[in-house]
Amino acid sequence: MEYNQPDSRWFEVFGIPDFETYKTRYVVKGLFHPYVPTDVTEAFKSVEFMMAYAFYHYPLYDEAASKILRITEMAIKLRCNQLGIPLDFAVSKQGKSLIKKKSLKTLMNDLTTCEPVKQLDWQFNISRSLRNSIMHPDRHSYSGVASKGFIERSVTLFNKLFLPEN
């Protein structure tokens, strides 16, 4: 296998004649407003590159989707920090006080409660469900370009998440 040869699936299955056509159809650009933190926008650049390099190795598109899920978790934690929502909680066990990290689901619930007008719950549920299926696979499979819509919705989620409440 040559690393600089396009993956034949793009030609044979999707009818993509060249990289420029592929890039136009399948690489999602991260267009973010100024309130989206640099940590999120910089991390998204890796997603763009993975999508671009999937032209040469189709499974990289799945890695782009996996990276989006990790960025989503980071973005949720960053937004919680901005809003003063604690990422952990104290637990008393056998007379000792322990600090435990909140689950991602709890942080998502905290955000939807804190900013109900944004209606983030359905997007969070999709992300959490996809995250669980990707991180706990039953078998090896590719979602490939079926992930494109999810990646596009994630860009929208990041923009929505960091919009000021007003």
Image (spheres, grey):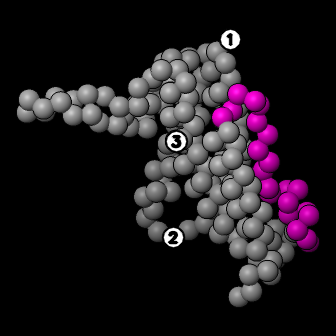
Q: Please tell me whether residue 141 is drawn above or below residue 76 in the rendered image.
A: below
Counting residues from the start of the chain, the first of labels 1 and 3 encountered is 3
* Disc 2 and disc 1 in contact, CB within 8 angstroms: no
Cα distance in 3D space between marks 1 and 3: 24 Å
Which mark, by number, is residue 73? 3
- Disc 2 is placed on an element classified as loop
In front of the other: 81 or 24 = 81
Label 1: how many Cα within 10 Å (few below 14, some 14–19, many 20+): few
Res. 138 in view: yes
Q: Position of residue 134 (x, y in %)?
A: 50, 57
Front position among marks 2 and 1? 1
Q: Amino acid at mark 2?
A: His
Q: Which residue is mark 1?
A: 166
- Disc 3 is placed on an element classified as helix
Counting residues from the start of the chain, the first of labels 2 and 1 encountered is 2
Label 3: how many Cα within 10 Å (few below 14, some 14–19, many 20+): some
In front of the other: 133 or 32 = 32
Furthest-bottom residue in this view: 1
- Disc 1 is placed on an element classified as loop
**Magenta span covers which residues?**
17-37
Location of the C terminus (image quadrant): top right
Looking at the image, residue 33 sits to the left or right of residue 135; the answer is right
Q: Amino acid at mark 3?
A: Glu
Label 2: how many Cα within 10 Å (few below 14, some 14–19, many 20+): few
Name the residue: 41% across, 26% down.
Answer: 86
Name the residue: 56% across, 29% down.
Answer: 79
User: What secondary structure is the stretch in magenta mostly built from?
Assistant: loop
* Disc 2 and disc 3 in contact, CB within 8 angstroms: no
Cα distance in 3D space between marks 2 and 1: 44 Å
Name the residue: 8% across, 33% down.
Answer: 94
Q: Which residue is mark 2?
A: 140
